[in-house]
Image (tube, grey):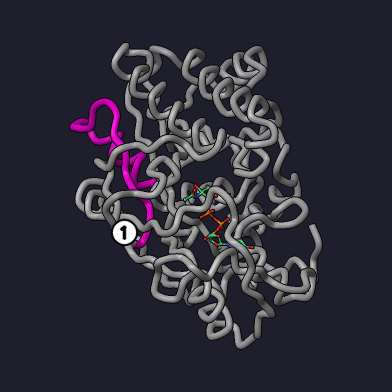
Amino acid sequence: MAKILVTGGLGFIGSHTVVELINAGYDPVIVDDLSNSQPQILDQLSKIIGFKPVFYQFDLCDKQKLIEFTKAEPDIEGIIHFAAFKAVGESVQKPLKYYHNNLTSLLNLLSVYSGKPVDFVFSSSCTVYGQPDELPVTENAPIKPAQSPYGNTKQIAEEILKDAIASGDAKNVIALRYFNPVGAHDSALIGELPIGVPQNLVPFITQTAIGKREKVTVFGSDYNTRDGSCVRDYIHVVDLAKAHVAALRLMANGTYKGYDVFNLGTGNGNTVLEIITAFELATGVKVNYEIGPRRSGDVEQVWGDVTKSSNELHWKAELGIDVMMSSAWEWEKYLSENPL
Ligand code: UD1
């Protein structure tokens, strides 16, 4: 069983990926500093997988701790690097915090594992495309100036990884550009756990439906889209998690070399209003919403071309909007009865 270091493994996407790694016969080792996750997720994971996964709590910006980790776990064969700050708005207020955390952790991982035969999967984002000139956007689309320090950390990280491959500091790297991950595991034992007021659409919808928030504000209804609200490519987090297993498999295959990047979406766009309707249809629960002004920094529409992921990563999203909404709702209901 190949041992895989999963940084940020107690977070939203990380925890779902831990489950999929175990389903695929890998041996995940979690590192998480709990800065944006809860230790109770370890117990939740053990309810799903039947045992408590190996967990180390430290900040990857602490290089000494990382070196100690490599001594305790000398046989890591792959790294999936989720650990990063991700709040777009906060990154504008506190850019140095974002540059320091997101880039120092990456640099520490690369330097500590430099020259070692370790395959590396990086969490990138469709935010690197900005507002694309052509839709659906392919991996060859030009990288647009970042709209936020958060987005910039993803762009810079991709550049760092490319250079590390060119210099031989890294063996194999796959950067995965996520579109909008939503939904939760079908056990309803893990899911997204926003701290404070959710910034993202789907947790805002589920918290409104359960009565924690008064209403959802739809940010803008005057965009040039079919109903005036923004379009995104929403993807189920379990599909997204499975793509990380596909990336490890591709790199383990002797023919893969170097650096590559893949879009992870469904290939379809949905408007904000369509998502609200889909939630209501999937759950039978009405969502109180109002139309508000545009949110600064939002792109009008983006959805991914997933041909390359399908042909070369041998991965495709399988779960539809209905399952994304119903699973997110089951998780919200679970949380309201079993607060973590
Ligand atoms: C953005 C980034 C993504 C990043 C994520 C992290 C882009 C294209 N995407 O996603 O890379 O990982 O933030 O948080 O830059 N909306 C409402 N009301 C709400 C919340 C959201 O109408 O209360 C709308 C937004 O305007 C947007 C859509 O819902 O059109 C999705 O928003 P959100 O869930 O915040 O994700 P993005 O901004 O697309």
Residue 35 within the segment the image draws in magenta? no
Q: Residue at x 56, y 45 (%)?
A: 14
* The image quadrant in which ligand 1 is located: bottom right
Locate residue 99, reporting x and y percent.
59, 25
- Can residue 120 be seen by looking at this rendering? yes
Pick the front one: 202 or 315? 202
Amino acid type at image mark 1? Lys
Task: Look at the picture and state if 293 lies above or below 214.
Answer: above
**Within the image, what quadrant is residue 70 found in?**
top right
Q: Residue at x 81, y 62 (%)?
A: 339
Locate residue 65, reporting x and y percent.
67, 17
Circle 1 residue: 316
Task: Look at the picture and state if 124 lies above or below 202.
Answer: above
**Within the image, what quadrant is residue 276 found in?**
bottom right
Please state the total of marks drawn on the protein image.
Answer: 1
Locate residue 201, reporting x and y percent.
60, 63
- Which quarter of the image is occupied by the C terminus? bottom right
Q: Residue at x 50, y 37 (%)?
A: 151
Q: Residue at x 47, y 47 (%)?
A: 21
Task: Look at the picture and state if 253 lies above or below 229.
Answer: above
- Which quarter of the image is occupied by the N terminus? top left
Residue 246 within the segment the image draws in magenta? yes
Locate residue 85, reporting x and y percent.
62, 37
- Can residue 29 be seen by looking at this rendering? no
* Disc 1 packing (10 Å; few <14; some 14–19; many ≥20): many
Pick the front one: 296 or 191? 296
Pick the front one: 174 or 250? 174
- What span is in magenta? 245-266
Task: Look at the picture and state if 304 lies above or below 4.
Answer: below
> Does dot 1 land on a helix, a strand or a loop?
loop
